[in-house]
Amino acid sequence: MAETKTKKGKKSGAKSNGVPKLKFNTGWEYAPAPESKTHIKLNDRYELFINGKFVKPLSGKYFETINPATEEKIAEVAEANVADVDKAVKAARNAYEKVWKKIPGSERAKYIFRISRMIQERAREFAVIESMDGGKAIRESRDVDVPLAANHFFYYAGWADKLEYAFPGRVPRSLGVAGQIIPWNFPLLMAAWKIAPAIATGNTVVLKPAETTPLTALKLAEIIQESGLPDGVVNIVTGFGQTGADIVNHADIDKIAFTGSTEVGKIIQKAVAGTNKKITLELGGKAANIIFEDAPLDQAVEGVINGIYFNQGHVCCAGSRLFVQESVYNIVLRKLKDRIETLIVGDPLDKNTDIGAINSKTQLETINKYINIGKKEGAEMYQSSCPIPGRGFFCRPTLFTNVAQSNRIAQEEIFGPVLAIQTFRTDEEVIEKANNTPYGLSAGVWTDKGSKIFNLTTKMRAGVVWANTYNKFDPSSPFGGYKESGYGREGGLHGLSAYLKI
Ligand code: ADP
């Protein structure tokens, strides 16, 4: 499916913005290197995972999950209705009261370690299915999503019997049943982020994956079943927004953990207001990546590429706004354009692919809508000239210059490979510009000066600030936002407290 057509880079020697164009070879000449699909096992139909078993939905309904790179159906998946959700919550409650809250942390840890090991053993299978169902490049799912998901289970398994050390002098107690709703950008990893801390702290779970990417959560259910985790500790129900709402509104749920759009986050917040449910929300972002004139420019450009183009820009902490100090603007822009010209867009299963498929037709329409808005607002667009497959949902890496602070492409989350570039002169100016957004999830700073890093990180309203790197994750680091990016932290010690009464 990946096009092998050779497309030469543009002529060398031409000047743009006074900076000579570099001579480069595009990567598009690589021979296809697709990852094999022969080692994966997928059913034609997936049921709900409730009380340790795969059961038919009471709704009697199923929906299709498709491969966004080919638009072909992969499998049918059960659509849970309110009665199915109720059944899952009852199973979770029963498991909580009768088993899970009673057994010692060291016993809980054994199961969670086992789940981590089993994900590692089946890592290739998970990576391929993740790329097929969600469209992300295999390099990402293989090197980032799956190892990090296994690491999350591993990390939280370690805490299960040490909770009193995490909160000295306190008696941490589990909450009960957690309802967890996750998006499509990191399907397995988000499931791990949610499930691992919840069960390590003695809670039981009803989790709903996103409707476009349910498969790796259901494969995880197979592992959970095989691991011998007591029935009902983890239940996985698939469906659309209504299934999510049925979880949120269920009276016997003690905690809601949601990752997704700010719009749905607000609906959920209203729904739980006035109830006893605890809540954590990880919502949208519009991160600023800031390059100072003293930064190592090649590394910074690579960090920008990693921050917005890899993973198709489907990252809530994507560095979608770039601020470049005026004195190095021309050279940075030249380097960026040259680099995006070498990115390979295409078959997510090809190991050479940098940018896979956009997750869904709807998302591609949203991205294209914003590209048109950017043009209409008067910003200048530059897109890589790489070939893209004729079928499936793909978007070329895109950047905009001449962007104003008020432009919608600089204010609103696009969730695609679209970068809005602005310039600045002073530290104060860039801090003000970077903070001028309703969001506050993450940011990046590129400079040679440690003092500048400290100055900026203390003044920027963002939950995570990366310095001279971008999009780096570790289970021991907390993650979460300010303002409309939500509240509560996931990961690390902070991630434990979200699931405990302390
Ligand atoms: P995105 O824009 O990233 O798709 P959404 O917020 O629409 O994000 O979806 C994230 C998750 O929330 C998905 O699992 C989706 O099915 C679920 N969801 C959508 N609407 C609701 C709702 N009203 N209540 C609860 N969950 C919802």
Image (cartoon, helix red, strand yellow):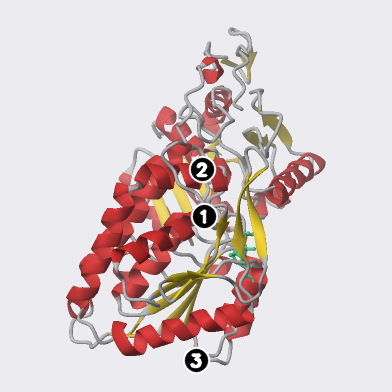
Viewer-closest of 336 and 189: 189
Classify mark 1 as within 8 Å of ligand 1 or not, answering yes or no.
no
Q: Is 474 positioned to the left or the right of 269 in the image?
A: left
- Label 3 or label 2, whichever comes before in sequence order: 2
Q: Which of marks 3 and 1 is in front?
A: 1
Residue 59 position in % (x across, y down): 66, 75
Does residue 315 lie above or below 56 as drawn? above
Which residue is at 61% across, 55% downward?
A: 212
Instruction: Give the camera-side residue of 340 and 257.
Output: 257
Judging by the rendered image, the residue that carries numbered circle 1 is 215
Image quadrant in which you'd find residue 5 = top right
Q: How far apart are marks 3 and 1 (CA)?
A: 32 Å
Which residue is at a point 33% across and 74% down the rendered structure image? 199
Question: Quadrant of residue 241 in the image?
Answer: bottom right
Q: Distance between the residues labelled 3 and 2?
A: 38 Å
Residue that mark 2 sits on: 131
Query: Which part of the image, by quadrant, shows the C terminus?
Result: bottom left
Residue at image position (63%, 14%) is 7
The kind of residue tagged 3 is Asn
Instruction: Return the mark for residue 276.
Output: 3
- In this rendering, which labeled residue sits more in front, label 3 or label 2? 2
